[in-house]
Image: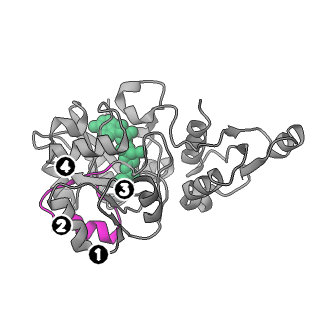
């Protein structure tokens, strides 16, 4: 069921259910972060390996402080600048966070989402919410309530409808190592925005150290239709006239402009019966970096 009624969402979360929840980035599958049963349900519904930890969503910086042992000053500045917003911080966790949330790691991923309904939800609850993106493992993240309902409608009691996600891409995940901010997942907050606050950041991509963010697996965000990144879409069409080919992106689009609709368009084109979807990489700046990363993963075997 899809609803805009906050009290229904609150009721289900309080009784330990998992629900679909809007955020400004993508929809999440939310449950009580202190309830091990609710957390298990999330892993089961999402078909996600238990080694892949969950992001804790809180309503205020003060609340975040109670779940961490240390808050390096530069990361605090990022929090003050970009929360509520598409920034997830990886911080040393306090004992209040159950080990299942972090898959045994001593660091917890934490963020304040910027969606009025969800902030209201978090403020009315006396526990934080864990929420992975509301897609089955390796599939495309949903940016509206209907898509969540299509994915999980029969497995969750309710999807709280907060409309179409404003950002349409997951949060950027940032930690602190050896006196430098490290980006573990490119996301809706650009590298340029981060660097305007903390100086040069290090981008640590999927293959370098697999253990750090298990969700950074190479194959991810995948449509069912084969997805190819090509140098030149026109040439590809000329060389493969026999194929029913969908042009996802030509590479000439403005990344910041298309970012919010990126996943929805990929989802839509996936359902159109093409033999193959093709795209060219976008300029590698601003959100172009994030979109290129997603296309690399979508095209990965
Ligand atoms: O925008 C978002 O971040 C969305 C919305 C719903 O908030 N959530 C989201 O969650 O994208 P998820 O679970 O799909 O992706 C979270 C990523 C995963 O790659 C996971 O491995 C990583 O964050 N992660 C979470 N906790 C971690 C931890 N303690 N240490 C390292 N990586 C962590
Ligand atoms: Mg995800």
Tell me if residue 226 comes above or below residue 187 in the rendering. Answer: above
Viewer-proximal residue among 19 and 123? 19
Q: Position of residue 269 (x, y in %)?
A: 65, 54
Q: What residue would you read off at disc 2?
A: 11
User: Comparing marks 3 and 4, which lies closer to the viewer?
Assistant: 3
User: Comparing marks 1 and 3, which lies closer to the viewer?
Assistant: 3
* Residue range (magenta): 111-131
Q: Crowding at label 1, few (<14), some or many (≥20) Cα neighbours within 10 Å?
A: few
Q: Which residue is located at x 10 percent, y 39 percent? A: 95
Q: Which residue is located at x 39 percent, y 50 percent? A: 133
Q: Residue 33 got which mark?
A: 4
Snapshot quadrant of residue 120: bottom left
Asked whether, in this view, residue 95 is left or right of residue 12, the answer is: left
Mark 1 / mark 2, whichever is N-terminal: 1
At mark 1, the secondary structure is loop
Q: Residue 197 got which mark?
A: none
Q: What residue would you read off at disc 1?
A: 5
Tell me if residue 54 comes above or below residue 10 in the rendering. Answer: above
Asked whether, in this view, residue 228 is left or right of residue 214, the answer is: right
Report if residue 249 is visible in the image.
no
Q: Position of residue 231 (x, y in %)?
A: 77, 38
Mark 1 vs ligand 1: CB below 8 Å: no
Snapshot quadrant of residue 116: bottom left
Whether the magenta-drawn stretch holds residue 51 is answered as: no
């Amino acid at each position: 069921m899809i609803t805009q009624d906050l009290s229904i969402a609150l009721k289900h979360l309080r009784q330990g259910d998992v629900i679909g929840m809007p955020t400004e980035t993508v929809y999440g599958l939310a449950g009580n972060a202190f309830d091990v049963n609710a957390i298990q349900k999330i892993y089961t519904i999402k078909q996600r390996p238990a080694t892949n930890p969950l992001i804790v969503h809180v309503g205020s910086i003060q609340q975040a402080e109670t779940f961490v042992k240390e808050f390096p000053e530069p990361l605090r500045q990022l929090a003050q600048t970009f929360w509520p917003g598409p920034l997830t911080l990886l911080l040393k966790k306090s004992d209040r966070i159950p080990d299942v949330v972090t898959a045994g790691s001593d660091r917890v991923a934490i963020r304040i989402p910027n969606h009025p309904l969800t902030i209201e939800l978090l403020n009315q609850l006396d526990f934080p919410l864990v929420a992975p993106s509301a897609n089955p493992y390796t599939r495309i993240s949903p940016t509206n309530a209907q898509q969540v309902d299509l994915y999980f409608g029969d497995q969750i009691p309710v999807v709280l409808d907060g409309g179409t996600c404003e950002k349409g891409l997951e949060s950027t995940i940032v930690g602190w190592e050896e006196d430098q901010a490290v980006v573990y997942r490119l996301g809706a907050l650009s590298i340029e925005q981060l660097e305007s606050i903390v100086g040069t950041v290090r981008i640590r991509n999927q293959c370098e150290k697999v253990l750090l963010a298990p969700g950074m697996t190479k194959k991810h965000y995948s449509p069912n239709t084969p997805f190819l990144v090509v140098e030149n879409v026109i040439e590809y069409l000329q060389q493969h006239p026999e194929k029913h080919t969908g042009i996802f992106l030509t590479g000439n689009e403005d990344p910041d402009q298309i970012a919010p609709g990126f996943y929805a368009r990929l989802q839509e084109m996936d359902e159109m019966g093409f033999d193959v979807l093709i795209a060219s990489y976008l300029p590698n700046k601003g959100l172009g970096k994030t979109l290129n990363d997603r296309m690399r993963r979508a095209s990965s075997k």
